């Protein structure tokens, strides 16, 4: 991260007469953040075709964890001064920022609401939805996380009274108290289907409760969705590590950028999220990869944060219609251009906008984009650091969306034709919120049928019609399935609401299952699983399993971050069969149908009938390969996952052996054990290794079989006894960066010991702490006045993620063909001095330099502190923090 905090100059706040009701105002004419913008622009990489300026600084929005922009351009920023690891209440707020005339200068602000630990915001109509931590007034500690909604009906920029809870207890209270929100529930987005999509981190949750009283438990991370009125809560996908947000395109394709687990085998992953899909973290993604939908790419280390799918015609084509993904650890907003690949996609990652510790991104209906950044606020937040920037294409002409609450129904329907996703969503939400909207339905349906319109508009109209008409619109949606352009979306809309599934006919889905289009097939498969109609089971069982469906060899990992479009349809078919409880049909398929798909589905059917059917099938066949598959399936269901109560968590580096995290026996286990032992006894000596592999792979703990190798399951993640652990050598190398930061909060360290470690660890080879010393690499004599303890720690642990200004590595090529890599320690108009990692200096005449390139990586390698204990690392940090 480039260090320009010392350059930030913030002028005194200038009051303005902006009227937040209609934005008829006397705007601020002086940009008090001009110098701050200049500092950023000189230090960061932004596309030349964009104009970017600081919109609000740390005086108003310190530690901005999230933001949302309304269609009309009001910016709501979630100030979270306790960060991801802090634990104090009373440090959060939603701040509303207004630019009256679209000139990029913030004209007024209000504290919209005082709310602890905001992690996700969504602003639509007069409502502002917030996902945040609820604290107990009695204990002053985190109690759980809730999704709430505020209203501002009088439009004064301040929420009207107390918020209404939509979902309560959607996180893990035990670890919210112990760790903070670093793996909790985060960003929220609304799709054109009208659902609120929630990014759930791998804390999971137990008995989350929506407004209808429905309860839901989820072990691990994934996506949850709920209607805007707080009902119909359900899991959308599962098996993600620690997502912070989702990006939703106009056709309801959902994309996520996950977080790395710092050495446990799960790096940043960009994924296409298919409803009902299993993505594998942490128990399937290494050793049972045949059972998961793989990510589209493994991107290495980093920390995915806010997301946005950019769909706005005012942006250049080269940027538009692309998922944008913020990465806090890499300090960049990335583009992920995607290309269709059967029922899924392939992608390419591209750097877009550099912003230190970027947290979120959103856009209004005028095409104005806003981004928030912690920029050094660190893991525990800060009251003094952070900002929001505004970005628009060069030559941008501001054209705000008028107050749509004043629009007629006819005009709102017309707005569904907009080439901007934000405008379409705003029009839809306003239409659906009106009591007198019945006249809109036929007009909307005309848009659905209008083949001259862009597909984004037809799909928006279709989903608007679906929500407006409810069960009464089913016949029209069935008609839409006969239009090949709309078939996929009409099938999704028909099966979208389980509340009226019994009224939806099966025939359109049976036709969809036989479509030549993989996307239509996927929609039909997901749909029949949601409808609960068993009439489609036999057709589902015709889905072919590809040759790629095979488990990795023991001791190896399968491809878990590689596009595999072949696996999508059978994976979804298995999920649908399980949802339909298709036990009898799968048993029948063992004899007369698609054995491979039936066996795959049976891996998740813990039922005595399945156990007996597998045993009988084994007795009735002479096919040795089939026998082995039957035995393997029985071993797979030997255990089941223990119920989750959120009293434990698997930590930052969980046991990844699988296939269960806390496997427990069930009523079918004794029969399976007896059968497996019988077959083991019958097996010749050369075949007994087969059972040893089963015992190892599935952790059966049948002593007679023996094991080849085994990784014992972890116990519940214990409360860390820091006193016992702090002096353990090598603990830094064994821990995630979050765990090290938590320890650093409690260990002050010994600066005198740190001074000795600075020498022992070889830091002096590249760094001086006194001006009288030979200046080699970055000077450490004032590091304590530039960085706080957490920033210093991060710079040591992840040097590539926090390259400060003047600390970057330079590569120089001379005209004579020599190459030099190092730090530029002296430079004049005619010459410069570059020092390599060993401290050797070379002075070069600038006239001899052919090329000079600033590299994206630090010369300082990662892992230099891995051999230290927590106490030693705290001492090293304490010593450096004193250098001021």
Image (spheres, rainbow, N blue to C red):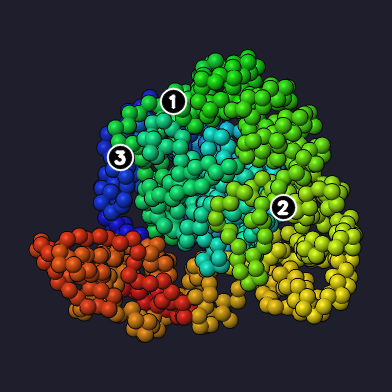
Picture quadrant where residue 15 is located: top left
Residue closer to the observer: 382 or 701:
701
Image point (69%, 59%), residue name: 646
Q: Residues within 10 Å of mark 2 (few under 14, many from 20)?
A: some
Q: Residues within 10 Å of mark 1 (few under 14, many from 20)?
A: some
Q: Position of residue 681 (x, y in %)?
A: 86, 77
Image point (46%, 77%), residue name: 866
Q: Can you identify the residue that label 2 sits on?
A: 217
Q: Position of residue 796 (x, y in %)?
A: 39, 71
In contact (CB < 8 Å): disc 3 and disc 2: no
Picture quadrant where residue 520 is located: top right
Label 3 or label 2, whichever comes before in sequence order: 3
CA–CA distance in space, label 1 to label 3:
24 Å
The secondary element bearing badge 2 is classed as strand
Q: Residues within 10 Å of mark 3 (few under 14, many from 20)?
A: few
Taking the image as shown, residue 484 lies to the left or right of residue 823, namely right
Taking the image as shown, residue 313 lies to the left or right of residue 298, namely left
CA–CA distance in space, label 2 to label 1:
40 Å
Taking the image as shown, residue 586 lies to the left or right of residue 246, namely right
Q: Can you identify the residue that label 1 sits on?
A: 401
Q: Is residue 832 above or below residue 333?
A: below
Q: Can you identify the residue that label 3 sits on?
A: 49
Label 2 or label 1, whichever comes before in sequence order: 2
Image point (77%, 63%), residue name: 625
CA–CA distance in space, label 3 to label 2:
46 Å
The secondary element bearing badge 3 is classed as loop
Q: Is residue 124 above or below residue 622?
A: above
């Amino acid at each position: 991260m480039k260090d320009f905090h010392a350059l930030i100059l913030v002028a005194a706040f200038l009051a303005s007469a902006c009227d937040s009701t209609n934005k008829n105002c006397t705007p601020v004419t002086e940009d008090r953040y001009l110098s701050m913008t200049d500092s950023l622009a000189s230090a960061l990489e932004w596309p030349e075709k964009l104009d970017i300026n600081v919109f609000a600084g740390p005086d108003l929005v310190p530690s901005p964890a999230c933001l949302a922009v309304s269609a009309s351009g009001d910016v709501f920023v979630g100030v979270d001064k306790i960060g991801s690891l802090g634990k104090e209440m009373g440090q959060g707020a939603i701040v509303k920022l207004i630019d009256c005339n679209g000139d990029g200068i913030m004209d007024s602000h209000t504290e919209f609401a005082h709310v602890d630990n905001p992690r996700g915001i969504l602003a639509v109509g007069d409502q502002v939805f917030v996902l945040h931590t609820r604290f107990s007034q009695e204990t002053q500690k985190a109690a759980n996380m809730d999704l709430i909604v505020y209203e501002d009906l009088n439009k004064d920029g301040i929420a009207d009274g107390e918020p209404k809870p939509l979902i309560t207890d959607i996180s893990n209270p035990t670890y919210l108290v112990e760790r903070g929100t670093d793996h909790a529930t985060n960003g929220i987005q609304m799709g054109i289907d009208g659902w609120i999509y929630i990014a759930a981190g791998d804390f999971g949750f137990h008995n989350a409760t929506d407004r209808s009283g429905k309860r839901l438990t989820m072990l691990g991370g994934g996506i949850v969705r709920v209607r805007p009125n707080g009902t119909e809560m359900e899991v959308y996908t599962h098996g993600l590590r620690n997502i912070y947000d989702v990006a939703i395109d106009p056709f309801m394709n959902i994309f996520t950028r996950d977080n790395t687990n710092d050495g446990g085998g799960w790096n940043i992953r960009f994924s296409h999220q298919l409803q009902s899909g299993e993505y594998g973290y942490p128990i399937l993604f290494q050793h049972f990869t045949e059972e998961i939908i793989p990510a589209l790419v493994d991107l290495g280390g980093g920390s995915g944060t806010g997301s946005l799918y950019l769909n706005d015609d005012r942006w250049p084509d080269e940027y538009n219609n692309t998922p944008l993904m913020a990465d806090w650890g890499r300090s960049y907003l990335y583009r992920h251009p995607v290309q269709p690949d059967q029922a899924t996609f392939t992608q390419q990652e591209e750097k877009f906008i550099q912003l230190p510790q970027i947290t979120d991104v959103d856009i209004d209906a005028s095409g104005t984009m806003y981004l928030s950044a912690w920029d050094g606020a660190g893991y525990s937040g800060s009251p003094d650091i952070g900002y929001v920037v505004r970005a628009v294409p060069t030559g941008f002409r501001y054209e705000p969306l008028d107050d749509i609450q004043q629009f007629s129904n006819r005009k709102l329907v017309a707005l569904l034709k907009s080439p901007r996703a934000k405008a379409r969503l705003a029009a839809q939400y306003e239409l659906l919120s009106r009591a007198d909207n019945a006249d809109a339905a036929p007009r909307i349906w005309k848009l659905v049928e209008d083949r001259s319109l862009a597909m984004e508009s037809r799909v928006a109209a279709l989903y608007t019609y679906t929500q407006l008409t409810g069960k009464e619109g089913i016949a029209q949606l069935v008609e839409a399935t006969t239009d090949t352009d709309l078939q996929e979306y009409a099938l999704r809309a028909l099966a979208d609401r389980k509340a009226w599934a019994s009224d939806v006919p099966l025939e359109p889905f049976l036709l969809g299952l036989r479509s030549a289009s993989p996307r239509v097939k996927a929609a039909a498969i997901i749909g029949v699983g949601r409808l609960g109609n068993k009439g489609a089971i036999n057709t589902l069982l015709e889905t072919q399993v590809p040759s790629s469906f095979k488990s990795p060899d023991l001791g190896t990992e399968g491809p878990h971050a590689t596009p595999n479009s072949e696996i999508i349809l059978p994976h979804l078919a298995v999920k649908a069969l399980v949802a339909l409880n298709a036990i009898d049909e799968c048993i029948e398929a063992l004899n007369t149908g698609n054995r491979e798909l039936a066996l795959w589905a049976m891996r998740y059917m813990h039922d005595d009938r399945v156990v007996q059917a597998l045993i009988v099938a084994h007795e009735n066949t002479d096919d040795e390969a089939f026998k082995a598959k039957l035995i393997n399936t029985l071993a797979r269901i030997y255990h089941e996952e223990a119920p989750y109560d959120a009293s434990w968590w698997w930590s930052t580096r969980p046991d990844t052996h699988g296939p269960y995290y806390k496997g427990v026996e069930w009523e079918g286990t004794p029969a399976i054990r007896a059968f497996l032992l019988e077959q083991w006894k019958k097996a010749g000596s050369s075949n007994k290794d087969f059972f040893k592999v089963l015992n190892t792979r599935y952790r059966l703990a049948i002593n007679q079989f023996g094991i080849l190798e085994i990784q014992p399951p972890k116990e519940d993640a214990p409360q860390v006894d820091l006193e016992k652990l702090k002096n353990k050598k090598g603990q830094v190398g064994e821990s995630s960066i979050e765990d090290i930061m938590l320890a650093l909060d409690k260990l002050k360290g010994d600066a005198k010991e740190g001074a000795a470690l600075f020498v022992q660890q070889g830091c002096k080879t590249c760094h001086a702490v006194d001006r009288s010393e030979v200046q080699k690499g970055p000077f450490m004599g004032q590091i304590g006045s530039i960085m706080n303890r957490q920033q210093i720690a991060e710079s040591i642990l992840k040097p590539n993620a926090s390259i400060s200004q003047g600390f970057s590595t330079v590569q120089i090529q001379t005209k004579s063909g020599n190459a030099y890599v190092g730090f530029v320690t002296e430079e004049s108009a005619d010459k410069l001095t570059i020092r390599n990692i060993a401290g050797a200096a070379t002075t070069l005449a600038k006239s001899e330099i052919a090329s000079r390139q600033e590299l994206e990586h630090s010369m300082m390698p990662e892992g230099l502190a891995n051999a230290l204990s927590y106490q030693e690392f705290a001492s090293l940090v304490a010593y450096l923090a004193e250098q001021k």
